[in-house]
Amino acid sequence: MLKEYSMLDNAEEPGEAKEDDHSPARHDTLKAYIAGVKKYPVLSREEEREVTRVIYKYKDLDAVEKLTVSNLRLVVKIAMSYYNTYLTILDLIQEGNVGLLHAVKKYNPYKGTKFSTYAQFWIRAYILKYLMDSWSLVKVGTTQSQRKLFFRLNKEKQRLESLGLYPAPKLLASTLQVKEEEVVEMQTRLTCNDVYLEAPLYDEGTDTMMELLSTDDDVEDIVSEKETQNVLKERIKAFKTTLNEKEVCILDHRLMSEEPRTLQQLGTRLAISRERVRQIEQRILTKARVSFNGDLVKSDIWPACNNQGTLKTSITANTR
């Protein structure tokens, strides 16, 4: 464990390396904190084993404090590795300390893993979560794969470029083992800044971004329409379970398709006559009227065809 902290003792403090990043007061606080951390001795392997066993068996608070303060150097060391990514290093240290306390609480000394190795996982986890949550003023829920992307995306792009490969989203998704859509989303999030809607559009003038946003649409109508569509999708999904394979095919490719297939096309596909397709189509409509309690109205959502031409109809969910 002593070897793990040697880099911290000899490393330049952020305040010395980049004098104009933050105020002198902030650097002084960081220097004072690091100096205070160095005052706590690092436990030997034997001492660590004894202290962790006392914590595990008796939940002794003095032992908890002893183990925690002896590993504060580890938190600083890990936090400093993210210094170029996020400059509020004191906040990173604070989050890392929370992760350290969680590791102290969860650690089982009888599984044979060194405490410092176990603690690194929780310290990094809390720091990474803080970075993701604080990247934008607008907090967005993230998945585990998105957290990985946040820190690995640019590094992986540089690696691929060094190999002479173009870092396309599909290739990045394959090498990082995530979905291509998540790569595209993360690239967009990392390249876009927050927009303050009350900020003036020009240096001179009072017009703001908020004034350009359309307010003609009724929010209640939009929400109601969205809710209706969601209910409709669920009812259609349930309705499909009552149909056989041919009926589902005709429903998807003719009755509910924006570009309905002809009777002949479906007949050829299903190896039946045009007339048989029409009969199955009418049977589906009959089942739909029964299933939806007769709530079948004309609309542009569900193009249903009959023997005389195209009749626009739709099932509208009764949400009342």
Image (cartoon, helix red, strand yellow):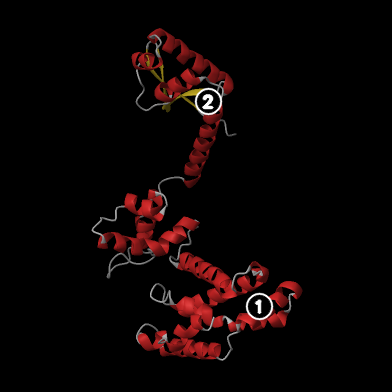
* Along the viewing direction, whichever of 160 and 93 lies nearer the viewer: 160
Residue placed at 70% from the left, 75% from the top?
A: 53
Question: Is label 2 in contact with label 1 (beta carbons under 8 Å)?
Answer: no
Badge 1 density bin: few <14, some 14–19, many ≥20, Cα 10 Å: some
Asked whether the viewer can see residue 21, the reply is: yes
In the picture, the quarter occupied by the N terminus is bottom right
Seen as rendered, the residue at the extreme right is 58
Which residue in the structure is indicated by mark 2? 240
On screen, residue 215 versus residue 97, left or right, reads left
Secondary structure of residue under mark 2: helix
| Above or below, comparing residue 79 to residue 31 in the picture | above
User: In the figure, 290 relative to 183: above or below?
Assistant: above
Say which label, 2 or 1, has the lower sequence index: 1
| Percent position of residue 113, x then y | 60, 70
- Quarter of the image for residue 195 reads bottom left
Image quarter where the C terminus lies is top right
Q: Quadrant of residue 302?
A: top left
Q: Is residue 122 above or below residue 149?
A: below
Q: Which residue is mark 1?
A: 49
Residue at point 40% right, 55% down? 176
How many residues crowd mark 2 within 10 Å: few (<14), some (14–19), many (20+)?
A: some
Is residue 208 visible in the rendered structure shown here? no
Please state which amino acid type lies under the numbered disc 2: Lys
**Disc 1 residue type (three-letter):** Arg
Whole-percent x and y of residue 139? 48, 62
Left/right placement of residue 269 relative to residue 66 reads left
Q: Nearer the viewer, residue 100 or 150?
A: 100
Q: Who's the residue at 38% across and 89% down the image? A: 16
Q: CA distance from mark 2 to mark 1?
A: 62 Å
Foreground mark, 2 or 1, reads 1
Q: Position of residue 212 (x, y in %)?
A: 34, 56
